[in-house]
Amino acid sequence: MTAVNAIEVNHLTKRFGQKTVVDDISFHVRQGEVFGLLGPNGAGKTTTLRMMTTLLQADAGQVKIFGHDTVKEGRLARSMFGLTGQYASVDEDISARENLMIFSRLNGLSRRAAKQRTAELLAEFSLENSADKALKNFSGGMRRRLDLAVSLITRPTLIFLDEPTTGLDPRTRTQMWATIRQLVRQGSTVVLTTQYLDEADQLADNLAIIDHGKLVKLGTPAELKQQIGGTKLSFTVRQADQVEPAEHLLTTSAASAVQRVGQNLSVRLKHVAALAPILAALNQAKITIDHLVVQEPSLDDVFMTLTVGKN
């Protein structure tokens, strides 16, 4: 029997006035993976997530959470996920411990169970030393960790994270990444919206790239990188009179456009296996090179190729 997807999004559309901000988007999220929604600011990522989590009504299309329609079975679907937004939805004037206790009680835990769950979450998110300080004295990173802790009180199997590391310092971002990986190891499915390419590359098993409200590409980070071109080879030709012969050799060997800046040449190879014959041919032609760099395509390359200049 085939496992039910954690999420199925079919032909999701949202308009604000005359502007279509999400335009007929479809994808699915498998159980136990990190799924990234990647795109520039204003691309439609957060609007898509708000429709998936029933915070915003779609104009067309359907979302299913573990097989349950979010419109027809809204309460049941909502009980199956936790949502963490960009800003903490907690009380500023009371402590982290008190916030967690209140939300635990609101989620139906007994006083004893709420106290135990609060202690567990304070420890898990390294907030024990600040547990009894008022939130208004918290740093941005501490508040973000608390917000995530609140969303995990009921141990949901599906977690939505909307820009979870926006504005955080590098150390706190790394801590959040470790927390997200730990959630997946414990069996959770995570949907992540982000504008940080390194974050998507580090965390996501699959990615949907959204631009101007449209789904422009879907796949694993590795697949997306491969689709926009393979390994990039660049080097400097030591002698100026050997640049043209080297460029001709590259054009013949790589069968793709060679970029030339002064005595520096670069080319994209369809397969990394093409590298050795090129280096052998340069050696045979007695063309001396320096500063050899072999670079795999990055999500930056994917992002720029798929989103920049698109209308």
Image (cartoon, rainbow, N blue to C red):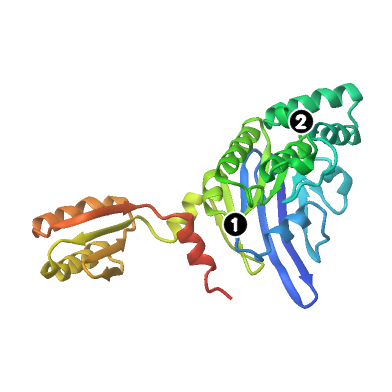
Q: Is residue 210 visible?
A: yes
Q: Is residue 278 visible?
A: no
- State the SS at label 1: loop
Residue 275 relative to residue 113: left or right: left
In the displayed structure, would residue 24 be above or below residue 311?
above
Image position, residue 253 (x, y; %) = 22, 62
Label 2 sits on residue:
131
Give the distance between the C-alpha atoms of the residues marked 2 and 1, in whole angstroms. Answer: 31 Å
Image position, residue 53 (x, y; %) = 78, 51
Question: For the residue carrying disc 2, how many other residues have a C-alpha within 10 Å: few (<14), some (14-19), or many (20+)?
Answer: many
In the displayed structure, would residue 287 be above or below residue 97?
below
Q: Amino acid at mark 2?
A: Ala
Quadrant in the picture for the C terminus: bottom right
| Depth check, front residue: 255 or 190 | 190
Name the quadrant containing residue 119: top right
- State the SS at label 2: loop
| Depth check, front residue: 138 or 229 | 138
Image position, residue 148 (x, y; %) = 73, 40
At a point 68% along the width and 36% down the height, the residue shown is: 188
Q: Nearer the viewer, mark 2 or mark 1?
A: 2
| Depth check, front residue: 88 or 109 | 88
**Which residue is farthest bottom?**
18
Image position, residue 72 (x, y; %) = 88, 52
Name the quadrant containing residue 216: bottom right
At a point 56% along the width and 40% down the height, the residue shown is: 171
What is the number of the mark on residue 195? 1
Q: Amino acid at mark 1?
A: Gln
At a point 72% along the width and 69% down the height, the residue shown is: 21
Residue 311 relative to residue 138: left or right: left
What is the number of the mark on residue 156? none
At a point 54% along the width and 67% down the height, the residue shown is: 307
Q: Earlier in the sequence, mark 2 or mark 1?
A: 2
